[in-house]
Amino acid sequence: MKNKNILRRVLNRVLAMAARFAPGATTLRPFLHRLRGVRISGRVFIGDDVYIENEYPESITIEDGVQLCLRSVLVAHTRGTGTIILRKNSFIGANCVIATAEGRSLTVGEGAVVTAGSAISSDVPAGTLFGVEKARALALVTVPLTMESTYREFIGGLRPLKPDK
């Protein structure tokens, strides 16, 4: 991608901040992102505080029927630009991070559902439920991580859980 002039870069960031906090998940927010250069087709839902690529908004494509839920993040550059494509009727749950790197294209397939809290760095097949397993207990905490304890003390105090019978 070519370098943009500083005024365009500032305008992109102002519009992005307005879009993150303005009302209008199906109206004003998509409109503001279109002004920034995000390729949006049809009617989409963009939830509160969604971050969509600031430096290269034109590297993001969002097709008709896509839903981007609360506080999700789309980043299409890591030391250069890639592309992110959210296909028709895909659903991105709350607090997801979708990121790609220079020269790479990441696609969330048509009708795919990405579960809340997922970090995605590779393609999501169409029509699939994709995400992390539910949270589970990992260890027994014998030294709480308080403001008075050190991280080293906390780690040293972790004990394996007894296996389920």
Image (tube, rainbow, N blue to C red):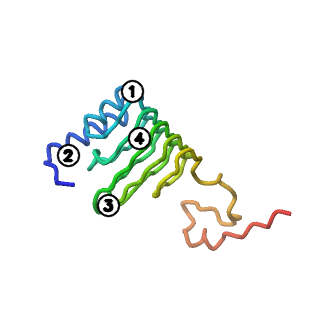
**Which disc, if any, is residue 50?**
4
Q: Could you tell which of marks 4 and 1 lies nearer the N-terminus?
A: 1
Identify the residue under disc 2.
Answer: 9
Residue 103 disc label: 3
Q: Quadrant of residue 41?
A: top left
What is the distance, in whole Å, between disc 4 and disc 2 at their CAs? 19 Å
Q: Along the horizontal axis of the image, is 30 left or right of 72?
A: left
Question: Does dot 4 land on a helix, a strand or a loop?
Answer: loop
Marks 1/2: CA–CA distance: 23 Å
Q: Position of residue 34 (x, y in %)?
A: 29, 35
Is tag 4's residue or tag 2's residue first in the polypeptide sequence? 2
Q: Amino acid under label 1?
A: Pro
Query: On the image, which quarter does residue 143 sit in?
Result: bottom right
Question: Sequence order check: which comes first, mark 1 or mark 2?
Answer: 2
Please identify, in this view, whether the residue under mark 3 or under mark 4 is nearer the observer: 3
Q: Residue at x 38, y 44 (%)?
A: 51
- CA gap, disc 4 and disc 1: 12 Å
141 vs 148, nearest the viewer: 141
Residue 157: image location, x then y, percent: 66, 70
Report which quarter residue 10 is drawn in: top left
Residue type beneath disc 4 = Val
Q: Position of 120 compared to 1: left or right?
A: right
Looking at marks 3 and 4 on the same chain, the residue that comes earlier in the sequence is marked by 4
- 163 over 131 or under it: above or below: below
SS assignment at label 3? loop
Q: Which mark is residue 23?
A: 1
